[in-house]
Image (tube, grey):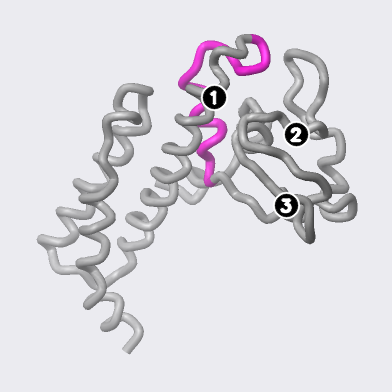
Amino acid sequence: MTPSEFRADCSNCAALCCLALAFDRGEMFAHDKPAGTPCHRLGLRDSEFACSIHEDLAQKGYRGCVAFDCLGAGQRVSALFSDTWKSRPELTAPMMEAFRIMRQLQELHQMLTAARALPLPEDKLAELSDRIAQVDTAKRDLESLHCFDPKPARDWLKSLAPFISRQGA
């Protein structure tokens, strides 16, 4: 597992953050946008998912776009679908839902990966490897993605609190 597992690759994504996320006009965004509505800054051609102001996001009032990190969820979800929401609008809701779940799994996966740096006993290290494998498996296809329950892994992470305290002492 490398940190690149958690890096966004916008060139292999169907602009899911620009579609799925809502934002309000203010310090971070220059206009209001409800969830499920494509940002009006996206390219207009069917095959295009490029932001028309990507190089100047912060200067044009879109610091929230600069700050957001999908942790690689966008390209992972895009790869699970044979088409995109632009060419097949009926995929909008399923892709948005998969993006929401995948983003949570990427965050969970990142936390589990970070736990490898803790001074864990052998039994906890074995459990950690199992948890990482379960999350990794859940991200491989849509059915697994939708069936995975992240709560046990999140609860297990909470059990590592004593090891975090020792690390900082």
**Residue 33, how many percent across, how many down?**
72, 39
Quadrant where the C terminus is found in the figure: bottom left
Distance Cα–Cα, label 1 vs label 2: 18 Å
Q: Where is 22 relative to 88, above or below?
A: below
Say left or right for 136 vs 68. Answer: left
Please tell me which of labels 1 and 2 falls first in the chain.
2
- Disc 1 crowd, CA 10 A, few/some/many (<14, 14-19, 20+): many
Residue 98 bears which disc, if any? none
Report the residue at 37% width, 23% height from top: 142
Q: Where is 30 relative to 89, above or below?
A: below
In the image, 33 versus 84, the foreground residue is: 33
Report the residue at 37% width, 32% height from top: 139
In the image, 6 versus 82, the foreground residue is: 82
Give the residues drawn in magenta, as a range: 71-87
Q: Secondary structure at mark 1?
A: helix
Say left or right for 74 vs 47. Answer: left
Residue matched to label 3: 66
Residue matched to label 1: 78
Report the residue at 35% width, 84% height from top: 168
Say left or right for 72 vs 163. Answer: right
Q: Secondary structure at mark 2?
A: loop
What's the amino acid at mark 1?
Answer: Ser
What's the amino acid at mark 2?
Answer: Cys
In which quarter of the view is residue 133 placed? top left
Report the residue at 68% width, 35% height from top: 18
Q: Secondary structure at mark 3?
A: helix
**Residue 29, how many percent across, how many down?**
77, 51
